[in-house]
Amino acid sequence: MTGIKKSLLGCLTVIGVVLALAVPALGGGRPFSTELSGDNEVQAPGSEATGTAHLTLNQGLGEICADIQSSGYEEGEVILAGHIHVGPVGVDGPIVVNLFVASANHSICVDVDTALIKDIRQNPGDYYVNLHSNLRPTGVIRGQLSK
């Protein structure tokens, strides 16, 4: 093998290793999913609406991505916001991540402090996703995260 071929092969090997290491960091993250239901709400349970929340927590990038799909709202009900809150099952807690405003179906990535992402990853049962509406400002559907 000539020197040029060896150099080219060496460069391609290095590029392949770099790409193999970089791809998981760029598109990676810890996935979580939860079913959203009105029966899970603490202050105003009973909504017939349902949904799903698929989250990807990427501590290395300091980012949480969410894909939330929901339906079945009352006539005239408009989704105003979606959040991640800290609080175990049956307990309302403060907002820790603002995911979006004004959409029942939404995909978004938001910057989040890496220490918070680490805590959510390690203790998902202490966090929940919920959507708030004009008719149920305290929350219309909710889903607890779990491992």
Image: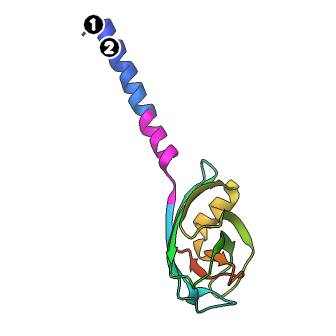
Q: Which residues are magenta?
A: 19-30
**At label 1, which amino acid type do we have?**
Thr
Residue at (69, 74) in percent of width and height: 86
Residue 68 among magenta residues:
no
Q: Position of residue 137 (x, y in %)?
A: 71, 80
Residue on which disc 1 sits: 2
Residue at (49, 62) in percent of width and height: 31
Residue on which disc 2 sits: 6
Q: Position of residue 119 (x, y in %)?
A: 65, 65
From this viewpoint, is residue 127 visible?
no
Magenta segment, prevailing SS (helix, strand or loop): helix
Q: Quadrant of the N terminus?
A: top left
Residue at the limit of the structure toward the right, as seen here = 94
Q: Is residue 126 above or below residue 65?
A: below
Residue 28 among magenta residues:
yes
Which image quarter: residue 94? bottom right
Residue at (66, 77) in percent of width and height: 132
Residue at the limit of the structure toward the left, as seen here = 1
Q: Considering the numbered disc 1 on the image, is that residue within a helix, a strand or a loop?
A: loop
Q: Nearer the viewer, residue 19 or 35?
A: 35
Tell me, yes or no, whether the two marked residues, 1 and 2, touch with CB atoms within 8 Å: yes
**At label 2, which amino acid type do we have?**
Lys
Q: Position of residue 20 (x, y in %)?
A: 41, 38
Q: Position of residue 9 (x, y in %)?
A: 33, 19
Q: Considering the numbered disc 2 on the image, is that residue within a helix, a strand or a loop?
A: helix
Q: Nearer the viewer, residue 2 or 132?
A: 132
Q: For this view, does 14 lie left or right of residue 97?
A: left
Label of residue 36 in the image: none
